[in-house]
Amino acid sequence: MTAPEPSKTLVELERDILDKNNRLAERNRGFFEARDILALNLVSSPGSGKTALLERTLTDIGGKINFAVIEGDQQTSRDAERIAAAGSAVVQINTGKGCHLEASMVHDAIRQLQPEGNSVVMIENVGNLVCPSLFDLGESKRVVVISITEGEDKPIKYPDMFRSADLCVINKIDLLPYLKFDLNALRDYALQVNPKLEFLEVSATVGTGMEAWYQWIQQARPSA
Ligand SMILES: Nc1nc2c(ncn2[C@@H]2O[C@H](COP(=O)(O)OP(=O)(O)OP(=O)(O)O)[C@@H](O)[C@H]2O)c(=O)[nH]1
Ligand SMILES: [Mg+2]
Ligand SMILES: [Zn+2]
């Protein structure tokens, strides 16, 4: 017996999903652009310190810049609770079995958050170095966070994520004395897949390098 002919191949189904996502992403982008909002999509493997980076950012410059945060995780509101404690408006999205945010989810979150004109919307994606790279959320810029406990070779193992990012934030540099980690090798690997990638080195918990991150945010804002 032969299997029934599927009406669409997997590749076609995947293309349909991505096409639909791209259309919705453009709507989100239009919303952000019309209001001079800087929207950042923070992507990384689990535990690189995305929420820690956001917490410190909100504490340090939340008084100067209007922030709104969208938190993506498979389960729990733990990150949203941390962000709320740091004083920002936040919406938590739980993706359940899903392993990335999609433009439609961000669209719903924007409706709830109603971010003000000229604000900065931080979208913390689900910790996953693979498929978040495929899904445009309508962000202005994509920021890949890598912590130095993950190894230098991640950019060449997960090239799509580093290729699609505008900025690479290297986090946990306070741990450099305890690890065998070659910062130059990480940069070289990342530049192999994306010669235009920018880099910042920070420690979200100690605070090292955060000033440069704040300057990068300021310069990326449409009003800058
Ligand atoms: N030493 C050190 N630890 C850090 C730093 N940033 C974050 N951490 C720790 O790393 C762990 C994970 O941090 P989170 O901010 O939860 O990471 P995340 O990327 O938001 O994690 P997911 O949302 O689960 O993907 C926590 O124990 C943090 O305290 C840093 O700069 N230095
Ligand atoms: Mg987090
Ligand atoms: Zn996924």
Image (cartoon, rainbow, N blue to C red):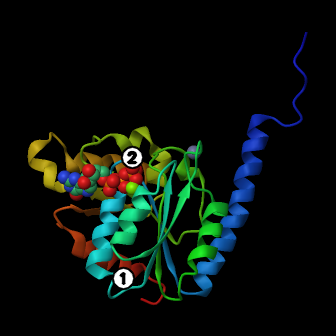
Q: Say which amino acid is labelled 1.
A: Gln
Residue toward you, 224 or 211: 211
Q: Which residue is mark 2?
A: 46
The disc placed on residue 218 is 1
Compared to 57, does 172 lie above or below? above
Residue 6 in picture, x, y percent from top left:
87, 30
2 and 1 marks in contact (CB < 8 Å): no
Q: Secondary structure at mark 2?
A: loop
Any atom of ligand 1 within 8 Å of the CB at mark 2?
yes
Residue 169 in picture, x, y percent from top left:
32, 60
Q: Nearer the viewer, mark 2 or mark 1?
A: 2
- Residue at position x 73%, y 64% in the image: 23
The disc placed on residue 58 is none
What crowding class fits label 1: few (fewer than 14 Cα within 10 Å), some (14-19), or many (20 or more)?
A: some
The quarter of the picture where the C terminus appears is bottom left
Q: Give the mark nearer the N terminus: 2 vs 1.
A: 2
What crowding class fits label 2: few (fewer than 14 Cα within 10 Å), some (14-19), or many (20 or more)?
A: some
Residue toward you, 220 or 86: 86
Residue toward you, 145 or 56: 56
Left or right of 116 on screen, residue 1: right
Q: Say which amino acid is labelled 2.
A: Pro
Residue toward you, 126 or 216: 126
- Residue at position x 32%, y 86% in the image: 63
Q: Is residue 191 visible?
A: no
The quarter of the picture where the N terminus appears is top right
